Image (cartoon, rainbow, N blue to C red):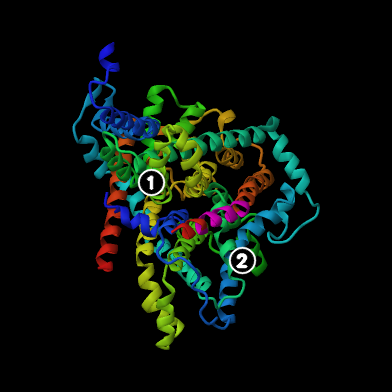
Amino acid sequence: MALGYDDVALHGARPETMAVVTAGARYPGKRRNLRRPRRSWLLTVIMCIVLAYILLPLIWLIVSSTKTQESLFGSFGLWFAQPFALWDNVVGVFTYDGGIYGQWLLNTLMYVVLGAGGSTLLATLAGYGLAKFDFFGKRAVMALVIGAIAIPATALTVPTFLLFSQMGLTNTPWAVILPSLISPFGMFLIWAYAREAVPTELLEAARMDGAGELRTFVSISSRLLAPGVVSVLLLEVVGSWNNYFLPLIMLNDPRWYPLTVGLNQWNNQATTQGGEVIYNLVITGSLVMIVPLVIAFLLLQRYWQAGLTAGAVKA
Amino acid sequence: MTTTLTPARPAGATRRGLRRQIGWLFVGPFVAVFLLVLIAPLAYAIWLSFFQDRLIGGLSFVGLDNFAKALADEQLWSSISRVVLIMLVQVPVMLGLALFCALAIDSARLAWAPMFRLLVFLPYAVPGVVAALMWGYIYGPRFGLVGDVSSFLGIPLPDPLGGDLVLLSIGNISTWLFTGYNMLVYISALKTIPSDLYEAAQLDGAGPLRVIRSIKLPALRPAITITVMFSVIGSFQLFNEPNILRALSPNVITSGFTPNMYAYTLSFAGGQYNSAATVAIVVGVLTMIAAYGVQIIGRRKES
């Protein structure tokens, strides 16, 4: 489609793109040496209102996770109520139905490690290969991948389900892992990054020294690619962790569910005949689910910004 | 045996030939999986869309009949019109808010700017499923905030998941999830503006609003085009939020509420694989046309 290389490469569709983009940014260095304008309190107040909107549901979630099923209905949503049941709820989340939540958590981790890890690995190898080698069919591969970026992943979900059910792959972990393994956008990012970050002269020198291509990749290129790879990995981890549509359509057996599908099943219990209402567990389970990702975000943000500035310095 | 080992060709050519294979060593695994999980499903869906499973006669080729049926399918069109309606309201609101936040944070006039940047971005770390569950409970009249406020005021508030407001309520979840993400895109784009432009503007005595209009907004235009495009794609492909809210409001949010939900229902619950494949293709093509249109408009404005 008409996604020009330049548009995506220079302006980026996602924040992570910027890490790649900055590798080739023309204007490195500070621009904040201008006279510092005065603080505007009006602006700060308006931003505080925006922040209240952003934080409202999260605060509601935290407060609600300390309530029992009964007090959820009987108390004001944004303030605590007796008894303080956070710990009971957490225990409930991990013990309900024979500890199925723990199983879902492990499944999610498996899908993230194999899906996000695998897709980042494949994208890195392919992006590097396309950026740094000449081979037969290279143009065709590149055109195919650029075209595929324009296809939204969700649009492929139903066709993939139809094919996989024909192949007998549905209701197995493979049905969730295999489609996660391909990220055309991730490959495109690595390709753009590798062109800037891995100097061809360096590869020539390594070849002169008689190093094999794989060894060169492992010991030299992969290190130069690291900031770009981290950006793609972050993107893929968020994608796998949040994945819902694909596992929902592919999996029947709750034992293979990821957390997203499992939590929704708990939620649906309330409306099914004879199902136990466990809103307190859905709420606490949601909180337990977002805590690791929020922490990972806060920790990785530094590394991700380091990658951004490292790229800028290089240019 | 000897033919392959004796240097019939000059050594350089052989090595170059070898290097050609080495390129494939890196690209091969990706391409193999790509063909399996991207090209094969597409090809299979297209193939399916030309057949129909009939009670009498079994699987038979029907040409473009499935597409004719899909294009005349009222349920499909009402699902498409719903997502278009959500898109027309939600995308401008979300991107406007993101743009405002980005300009505020970039202005150096905002106190605690790094904190705002981080916290507004935070919902990006929340899975869409959890966001939909949270907001769904908040919308709920029984133990949600809307119910609390309603009983506090002593007047019944309109049901956010009722027929009149449900589209806004769904749009609100997307806005909450993705404002921060789009904000970061704009902030990154603003950072690439060279400082001499600002210095020149300062020398000319341009005020902050003038700087925004003459320097920042033009520099943001490509980033805005990209975010509009991604948001349009996201709207057309809407699935998670309505699918989850359906448990709370099954009469309003029907099984074919959005095009993807319709395709899901056809394939999963209905077992109508041929119709499902056709709907998936029609919606995918419409999504790509819309995204393409945004690109063209964005480019024309740029030049």
- Give the chain of mark 2: B
> With respect to residue A129, does A80 lie above or below?
below
Which of the two discs, 2 and 1, sits closer to the camera? 1
Q: CA distance from mark 2 to mark 1?
A: 42 Å
Q: Position of residue A34 (x, y in %)?
A: 51, 79
Q: Chain of mark 1?
A: A
Label of residue B115 in the image:
2
Q: Tag 2's secondary structure?
A: helix
Q: How many marks?
A: 2
Residue B43 position, x and y percent, is 28, 32
Spot occupied by residue A264 in the image (x, y as percentages of width and height): 57, 41
Horizontal and vertical percent position of residue A40? 57, 81
- Closer to the camera, A189 or A218? A218
* Residue type of the residue flagged with mark 2: Met
Range covered by the magenta-colored residues = A298-309
Q: Disc 1 on helix, strand or loop?
A: helix
Q: Which residue is rendered at x = 47% and y = 33% of the image? A: A215
Q: Residue A133: which quarter of the image?
A: top left
